[in-house]
Amino acid sequence: MRLLLAEDDPKLLKSLKHIFETNKFSVDVVSNGEDALHYALSGEYDGLVLDIMMPGLDGIEVLKRLRKEKVTTPALFLTARTEVSQRVEGLDAGADDYLPKPFSTSELLARVRAMLRRKDNYVPDLLSYKEVILNRSTYELCYGGSTQTLSGKEFQITEMMMQQPHTIISTEQFMTHIWGWDANVDTSVVWVHISNLRKKIAAIKAPIEIRFVRNAGYMLEDRI
């Protein structure tokens, strides 16, 4: 697997490069947002690992521009930010996951493996339910001519629910399937993504909704 790593701290950049290469990843490294954008636009990477706070363009702006150009390469943010609102900003920009600093090597590798896991299996480009279409190539949710672009994790949650509508999916099932059983991430992140998804579903006036079932999980059903 080939990764693009963008980090402006030279010591951390060198350390991360060593970690990834030791674990059999091919890595290109850059230290600013402009270079990260230039390299990532090539589309030759299996995954992106981006620091948020970088000189020039920050990581969030880099990813926004990539998603605008339909570059769907999975992306993980490295960030010192810990507040939920700031995490949501990164996820809304199109990130698949985030990892607050400081972090352990094992957690970093687990997050990256989970991020890349969806590339292992081929799936059809389009998935539909109740005339709502999920484009698996562009991460777009479409209905009646309206479109909303999903982040990587929003896409994976939507895909799971559209594949089995009217079926309750537990938080643990989302965590295992999307983040990986060994990932060290708070389960509240599922709620954050579901909340964002509900807003995007409402924005395109889709005839579906995500219902919370107490002590059970979430279910995609027809909007009444």
Image (cartoon, rainbow, N blue to C red):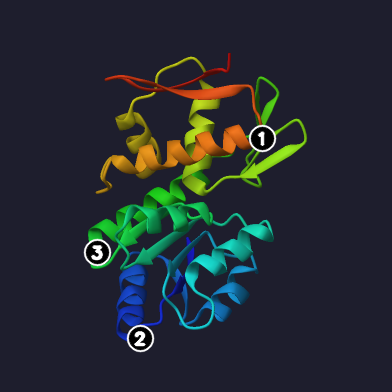
111 is higher (above) or lower (below) than 160? below
Q: Secondary structure at mark 1?
A: loop
Q: Please identify the quarter of the rendering in which residue 178 is found.
A: top left
Q: Which residue is mark 1?
A: 204
Classify mark 3: residues with Cα within 10 Å, few (<14), some (14-19) or many (20+): few
Q: Quadrant of residue 25?
A: bottom left
Locate residue 36, reporting x and y percent. 54, 75
Residue bearing mark 2: 10
Give, as a three-letter code, the residue at label 2.
Pro
Name the front one of labels 1 and 3: 1
**Which label was assigned to residue 127?**
none
Depth check, front residue: 44 or 171: 171
In the image, taking residue 157 as reference, residue 80 lies left or right, namely: left
User: Residue 74: horizontal and vertical position, in percent?
Assistant: 51, 55
Image point (51%, 37%), residue name: 197
Q: Which mark sits nearer the N-terminus, 1 or 2?
A: 2
Percent position of residue 104, x then y: 22, 63
Residue named by callout 3 = 105
Left/right of residue 144 with respect to residue 41 in the rendered view: right
- Percent x, y for residue 82? 29, 60
Closest to the camera, between mark 2 and mark 3, is: 2
Label 3 SS: helix
